[in-house]
Image: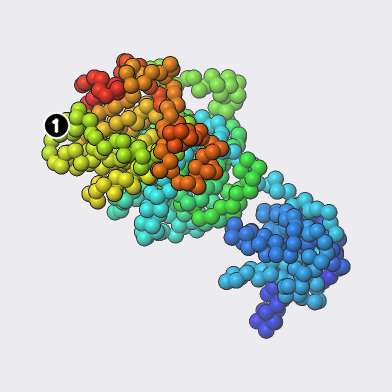
């Protein structure tokens, strides 16, 4: 078969199939090269039940799905894709099926292949019969297998840092802003202009554009995360279409404070990290996650994104789609970095130029590291006291643990409230006097958050204050809205409230903290209450007491039954799902659901709080079988 297609430009204009032939030649070139076999050996002149699809067009997942759906029409088959090489191996059960596929396409008699064109795309896939039992895919192993978790000193990945709703909200607005075009990508800069090539900023020249207001929530959340570092004041937004990447680099030291973060929007992809010792690790950054760079990874590791359309994540092929990243940094006006990684630090004698020429000092440094071992070197931290180190480590530990609700909260709290909401609400209409009293004691005009507002029974307690309510249960929120149009409520996770810090004059948390099944979660929920409260603001917390007359508890972690009357339950549910999962009490005509509680012993909430900074306890008492504390933020 003659594939040496030399095309005369004029001929190409006259004969449109030649354009296709040129593409074919390129595709076949890739196939033969990576399979290391001549084309004649790879393809069969006679119909077989196996096909090779070349230029498979897995540019993105859409193409992949298109082709799989197309192939499926002709019968059961096995499709092996080799996305790196843009071809695939398809095996049908019989020849009839592959024959039908080929016949459904445009057939080019002279070289016996069939071509599937994509609507609206300058792209086609060609199919050939083959006798091969399999293809080797040209070594799919070219793509490193990335992990969802890695162990890189100073690097933290926080999942679900923002919600899908917030992501959508900011995406729409980001797309309305002006983009600057780089050779590879499009970018937006705020606060300070980034100088590529040197990977730095001009600290004396703030950009005209400051970080937009619509990003304030995420900016302040990042500022909290990096405390005690100064507030975030620079933002770079990078846009990566499939196939785009960023070469290996690290941020120069002097113009930026230590910590910075990169938040991924829309699509995940793999970031590659390379240490100064040559060690390489690959981490998958999922959408809406936040990667926090501190210490060694920030000062002395290269990070990069390979220019690919697909990644391999724990063995699975992951198709990239459009991704935006928000890189938030703090500018350092004094330009004096005093990190311990002085061989990479421009403030301490490092010169990127000499580094490129294999800086002899660096060679010496690496030799020394090899001698004493990196472990020991890590322990030597100039300019910081032991106490400071401990403090930083504690803080990083804490960051690592920005915790997520477990299955217990999902299955035995959240899902149950969803089910029992109307019935629950019908039994919870009377506000408790002491809580009303607290709300009525607030200054007129106060802004108050009711975190875990349930059916909203306190939202109208004091008409002179402004209240917002959050809850995880959509069905309870529905009830709030039915009660009054004026109620401002929305769904939120109490462990990570989508609310700006220091915003509220007071915060209440009624019967919420006891639904978290471990101490870390209970503390995180309280930390969030503290975070959104203004300095000197009050926080009222109610939790179920173990010591109560209404119920006897033999232990602290309990599942408390809720007898849901049949009239509140969907018939269908009673018959099917519930019968398998939940107990039905035929006599009482109820379905028995169980809610998880951690009931608090006397003094326990105070003990939990004693491990947390930033407030004092101004009151504590017992009310309606609950232990109660009132905190005042420092
Ligand atoms: O896209 C990212 O996550 C990283 C961007 C980055 O490394 C940079 O802007 O310096
Ligand atoms: Fe970077």
Residue 141, percent across and down? 70, 45
Q: Which residue is mark 1?
A: 441
Count every numbered label the image shows and give the total.
1
Specify whether 8 is left or right of 331.
Answer: right
Colouring chosen for the image of the structure? rainbow
Q: Left or right of 260: which side holds 209?
A: left
Give whichever of 443, 308 is nearer the camera.
443
Q: Nearer the viewer, residue 122 or 185?
A: 122
Bin the neighbour count of mark 1 within 10 Å (Cα to Cα): few under 14, some 14-19, many 20 and up: few
Quadrant into which the C terminus falls: top left
Image point (23%, 25%), residue name: 630
Q: Assign the N terminus to one quadrant of the image.
A: bottom right
Could you tell me residue 226's position as x and y percent? 37, 34
User: Residue at horizontal 54%, vertical 51%?
Assistant: 245
**Residue 584, image x, y percentages:** 49, 35
| Res. 405 image quadrant | top left
Residue 535 appears in the rendering? no
Q: Is residue 237 visible?
A: yes
Q: Position of residue 412 (x, y in %)?
A: 46, 33
Compare residues 577 and 512 and report the one nearer the observer: 577
């Amino acid at each position: 078969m003659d594939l040496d297609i030399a095309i005369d430009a004029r001929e190409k204009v006259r004969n449109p199939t030649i354009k296709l032939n040129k593409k074919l030649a390129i595709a076949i070139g890739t196939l033969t090269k990576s399979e290391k076999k001549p084309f004649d050996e790879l393809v069969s002149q006679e119909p077989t039940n196996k096909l090779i699809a070349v230029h498979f067009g897995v540019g993105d997942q859409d193409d992949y799905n298109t082709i799989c759906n197309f192939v499926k029409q002709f019968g059961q088959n096995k499709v092996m894709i080799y996305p790196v090489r843009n071809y695939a191996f398809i095996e049908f059960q019989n020849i009839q099926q592959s024959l039908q596929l080929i016949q459904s396409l445009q057939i080019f008699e002279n070289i016996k292949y069939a071509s599937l064109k994509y609507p609206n795309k300058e792209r086609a896939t060609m199919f050939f019969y083959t006798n091969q039992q399999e293809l080797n895919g040209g070594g799919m192993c070219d793509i490193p297998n990335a992990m969802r978790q890695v162990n890189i000193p100073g690097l933290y990945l926080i999942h679900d840092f923002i919600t899908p709703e917030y992501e959508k909200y900011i995406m729409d607005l980001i797309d309305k802003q002006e983009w600057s075009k780089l050779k590879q990508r499009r970018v937006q800069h705020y606060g300070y202009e980034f100088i590529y090539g040197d990977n730095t900023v001009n600290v004396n020249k703030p950009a005209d554009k400051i970080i937009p207001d619509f990003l304030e929530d995420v900016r302040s959340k990042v500022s909290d995360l990096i405390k005690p570092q100064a507030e975030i004041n620079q933002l770079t937004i990078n846009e990566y279409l499939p196939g785009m990447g960023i070469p290996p680099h690290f941020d120069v030291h002097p113009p930026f404070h230590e910590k910075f973060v990169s938040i991924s929007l829309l699509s995940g992809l793999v970031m590659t990290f390379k240490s100064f010792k040559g060690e390489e690790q690959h981490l998958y950054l999922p959408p809406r996650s936040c990667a926090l760079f501190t210490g060694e990874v920030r000062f002395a590791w290269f990070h990069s994104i390979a220019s690919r359309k697909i990644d391999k994540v724990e063995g699975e092929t992951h198709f990239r789609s459009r991704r935006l990243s928000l890189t938030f940094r703090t500018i350092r006006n004094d330009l004096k970095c005093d990190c311990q990684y002085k061989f990479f630090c421009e403030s301490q004698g490092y010169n990127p130029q000499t580094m490129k020429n294999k800086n002899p000092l660096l060679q010496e440094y690496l030799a020394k590291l090899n001698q004493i071992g990196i472990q020991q070197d890590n322990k030597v931290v100039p300019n910081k006291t032991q106490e400071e180190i401990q403090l930083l480590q504690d803080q990083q530990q804490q960051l690592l643990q920005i915790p997520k609700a477990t299955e217990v909260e999902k299955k035995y709290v959240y899902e149950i409230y969803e089910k029992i909401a109307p019935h629950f609400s019908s039994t919870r209409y009377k506000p408790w006097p002491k809580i009303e009293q607290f709300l009525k004691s607030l200054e007129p005009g106060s802004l108050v958050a009711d975190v875990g507002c349930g059916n909203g029974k306190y939202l109208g307690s004091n008409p002179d204050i402004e209240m917002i309510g959050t809850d995880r249960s959509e069905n309870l929120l529905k009830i709030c809205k039915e009660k009054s149009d004026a109620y401002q409520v929305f769904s939120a996770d109490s462990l990570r409230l989508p609310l700006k810090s220091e915003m509220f004059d007071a915060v209440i948390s009624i019967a919420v903290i006891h639904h978290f099944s471990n101490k870390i979660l209970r503390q995180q929920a309280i930390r969030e209450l503290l975070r959104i409260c203004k300095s000197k603001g009050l926080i009222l917390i109610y939790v179920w007491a173990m010591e109560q007359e209404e119920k006897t508890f033999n232990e602290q972690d309990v599942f408390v039954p809720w007898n849901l009357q049949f009239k509140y339950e969907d018939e269908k549910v009673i018959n099917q799902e519930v019968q398998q999962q939940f107990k039905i009490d035929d006599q009482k005509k109820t379905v028995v659901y169980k809610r998880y509680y951690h009931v608090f012993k006397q003094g326990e909430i105070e003990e939990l709080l004693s491990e947390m900074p930033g407030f004092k306890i101004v009151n504590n008492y017992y009310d309606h079988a609950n232990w109660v504390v009132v905190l005042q933020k420092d």
